[in-house]
Image (cartoon, rainbow, N blue to C red):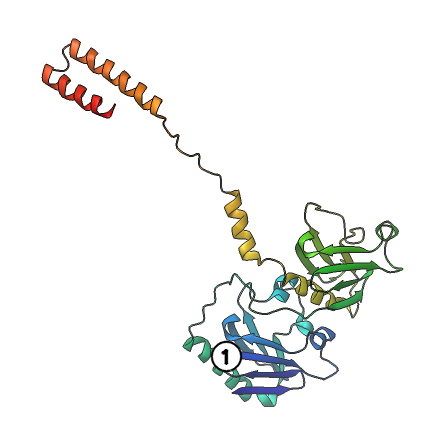
Amino acid sequence: MAEIIQKDGTWAFDGDALRLTPGRDRNVSLLRRELGELVVPLGALAGISFEQGKKAGRLRLRLRDGADPLLHATGGRLTEPHDPYQLIVESDRYGVAEYFTDEVRNALLLDQVPSEPVDEYLLPGPSVPLSVSAGDGTAGFDGERIRLEWNWKTEDAKAAAGARTLTLTDITGVEWQPAAGLENGYLRFTVRNAPTKAPPKYDPNAVELWGFKKDPLMALVAAAVQARLPHPARAAATEVRDARPELPSPPVASAEDDHDALLRRLRELGELHRTGVLTDDEFALAKQAILKRM
């Protein structure tokens, strides 16, 4: 078993899975602490790397596309402090980090784990029920229903409709976007048969985020919902199949159609015989063949 213990967290590998436990240091992000321990099966990994720095290094895991609902829901937009697949390594533990990296890489080679995308989630996503308050509202999810409630900072036009309850069957997608520069972030749910292009500030299916400390926690709600939606790879395959035009079925000839066609053929043969194209023997053989089919 390979293990590396740091203030930032502890990573352990037993040959089959990696166990990622966030540290208790005050610099560890709120999202990582709330997410808790992650168990990543070896089959979900696409690779591992270790980068050395002057004062500290960094271990990084690369997961296969589609393996983790958290990464899918956030679109790779989790910044370094909140990314659970990075570990800060102190300089006096560089040797341990290199050994850990080699152990995981060797296991990937021995098990011949492919790096291609997967069509099912290999991690379960955050546990439910959970509720997060940030930005202009509170988002709760119990595994079946999403509850959006508004606060005093919510735009009046959006708050006027009151709290919203959405079921999983209502939802076709979910996205978390962090605030960046002058652009606010959001947690947005795409509702079936009710597309909207309204900014999150006015969208009753979105929570607007302004870049405060608890904003990243909304990514947990996004991931928990994403984990219970159809996997995007399978959904895409279904859309392609449904969009494929159906080829018309070949017409089925009725008995009457066949009979009429044979009669026409007899008349054609008679004309060919009369004009001398067919000899008597040739006409007799062709006529006999058609009569047998009739």
Q: Position of residue 32 (x, y in %)?
A: 69, 75
Q: Residues within 10 Å of mark 1 (few under 14, many from 20)?
A: some
Q: Point out residue 271 in the picture as x, y percentages from the top left corner.
A: 21, 11
Element carrying mark 1 = loop
Q: Where 37 sits versus 246, above or below?
A: below
Q: Is residue 268 left or right of residue 91?
A: left
Quadrant assignment, res 224: bottom right
Nearer to us in this view, 270 or 73: 270
* Residue occupied by mark 1: 16
Of 45 and 213, nearer the camera is: 45
Q: Nearer the viewer, residue 196 or 273?
A: 273
Q: Residue sitting at 58 percent across and 70 percent down? A: 123
Residue 106 in percent (x, y) is at 44, 80
Residue 280 in view in this figure: yes
**Where the C terminus falls, by quadrant?**
top left
Q: Is residue 171 visible?
A: no
Residue found farthest to the bottom: 92
In the displayed structure, 73 sits above or below 157; it is below
Q: Measuring 55% from the left and 88% from the top, which residue is drawn there?
A: 96
Query: Could you tell me residue 155's position as x and y percent?
Result: 86, 53
Q: Is residue 128 above or below residue 104?
A: above
Quadrant in the picture for residue 11? bottom right
Instruction: Give the residue furthest to the top.
Output: 275
Count of numbered badges drawn on the protein: 1
The residue under label 1 is which amino acid type?
Asp
